[in-house]
Image (tube, helix red, strand yellow):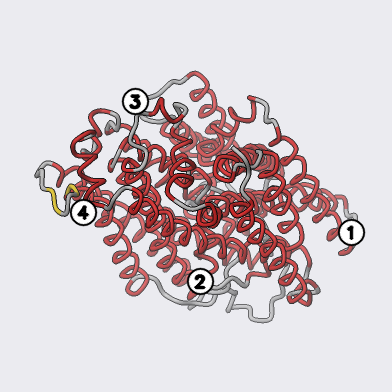
Amino acid sequence: MNKKEKYGQIRKEAIACFWALLAIIAFWAIAGIGVSQLNITIFHTPLWAITGCIGTWIFSVVLVIWLVKHVFKDFSLDDEEEPLKKEGADER
Amino acid sequence: MKGNIAALLPVFIFMISMLAVSIYLRKVNAKEESQGFIKEYFIGSRSLGGFVLAMTTVATYSSVSSFVGGPGQAWSIGFGWIYMSVVQVTALFLVLGVLGKKMAIIARKIDAVTVIDVIRHRYQSDAIALISAVIVVLFFSATMVAQFVGGAKLFEAVTGYSYMTGLLVFGLVVVLYTTVGGFRGVAITDTLCAIVMLVGMFLLMAGVLKQGGGYENIMEHITTNKPEMLEPFSGGSMPLTLYISQWLLVGVFTIGLPQSVVRNLSYKDTKSLHRAIIIGTIVVGAMNIGMNFIGVLSQGVLTESLDAYGNSVDNIIPLTIATSLSPLLAGITIIGPIAASISTISSLLLSATSSIVKDVYLHEMAKRGTEVPESRAKLLSQACNLILGLAIFAISINPPDVIWKINMFAFGGLESAFVWVFLMGMFWKKANRTGAVWSMVGGTLVYCISMLLGFKIAGIHQILIGAAVSLICMVIGSYVGKPTDEHILEEYF
């Protein structure tokens, strides 16, 4: 990947994170406050507490794994266009 | 209450092992120092793998309040508090996923060691670097004092030894091991801290369940006596505005916290980053849900009203530990919250030192064309870290009121100052020096003033005002000011 492609990919990943954030907020609201309207209790625990807390956590983990597997890409963090370049803040 | 040696010993042994680990790491990695001491000391020569990156980010982020104050609130509020704390699962993937790769590439290009190096280069401004350094040192110092005090108070309450003993046992050692170990030491000890936090959490959960007569029993007690604890709004104690506030303050805007962002300069490769995002999200969720769940379950152990427990929710977790576990187990369990406190202190201390030594002193010397020999940089870095650490330690013995004020402002103040400077700097070409300075100064000032006055919009925490003003300043400033040089922008876009 050259610099342009890398930066394009980074932008894509950042935007994907933003959508993931929105998805988690929506899931959190529905699985918590939404489900609480149903007034269901299982194992002496209100259902909304299970779906809203543990549910949101699992949803986030699954979403993050999906992001990493399908949106995020591996590439070198060093400059490949100028392989001989040494460190230093004084380029060009 | 008299001190019990069985409760003191585990913390003592743990702290000594932290020190030993740091000394060992320093020895083993001595050859890395020859590649550049500053880079090794402040950023671990960019070598962190995924697991350590995840754990050090989580541990820095989880403070003593995640283990004491927060769960204490959960005791009083109920499940709503867990529901609120779970918003923190977004923290890791935002800071690592959005800023991670860009910052890492730039840092390698310009040889940046601190986030302020990156800010200085992106905006080509010494002024903004200096303002950043002042904000970082001020807010970090106040936060460190709060962590010291929180840890020592907990120690006092659980072990029966004095506040001062607690402060000496873990406070001095954390300063020492941070000074010796540098960033690599901090990262590895943070990782160990995160692990003992989880262990402490499971021990305490088992203890509480047993002491409360089992889960069913505890839940029946809550259903009969405090049914509002089973509602998301907790009978009005958890209004929607509080949820929105927390989403902003401990969720979304944590992307701007410099102590988290700096981790983006320290990891090895994209594989490590990807792993860290997954592991970090799992651990941060487990910790927040677990600890606050313990808080709720403590209702089964501490069944009276808050008056009976000194009228402060901060007393709930120490009392729960003391009543539901034997002295030895209690001693092991409090390593968890102590670890949460020291892992935050170590990272903040090192970051503050890097701001003083690297961002202010070494930069000034370079500008004057004065060469600073490696040995001098080495001595200065460690001396500065030690002195700053000891100063914070001394303040923590009897902190003045002003420290509490600053600490209250620290979290949101850092977010208001840095969030757009980082985000827009990395993703918006037009962002320039004027925008960045206005954003940082305007956002922080307006945030602090609105906090002082208690002024809120729509009942939502002042972070909304701080972040909004900061964004507006960034946009207007960037249109008003001179555009950034093309050859600088070329590195970023």
Mark 4 to mark 1: distance in Å? 56 Å
Q: Nearer the viewer, residue B158 or B447?
A: B158
Residue at 43% x, 58% y: name it: B203
Q: Residues within 10 Å of mark 1 (few under 14, many from 20)?
A: few
Position of the N terminus of chain B by quadrant: top right
Q: Mark 2 against mark 1, which lies toward the viewer?
A: 2
Q: Residues within 10 Å of mark 4 (few under 14, many from 20)?
A: many
**Residue type pointed to by label 4:** Thr
Residue lying farthest to the bottom in this orientation: A84
Pointer 3 residue: B459
Residue at 56% x, 28% y: name it: B445
Residue A10 appears left or right of B2 = left
The local secondary structure at tag 1 comes to helix
The local secondary structure at tag 2 comes to helix
| For the residues bearing labels 2 and 4, Cβ distance under 8 angstroms | no
Pointer 2 residue: B50
Q: Is residue A82 visible?
A: yes
Pointer 4 residue: A51
Residue B421, picture quadrant: top right
Task: Kindly indicate whether the residues beneath marks 2 and 4 are on one polypeptide chain.
Answer: no
Residue at 18% x, 36% y: name it: B224
Residue B378, picture quadrant: bottom right
* Residue B376 - label: 1
Mark 1 to mark 3: distance in Å? 52 Å
**Residue type pointed to by label 1:** Arg
Residue B7 appears left or right of B453 = right
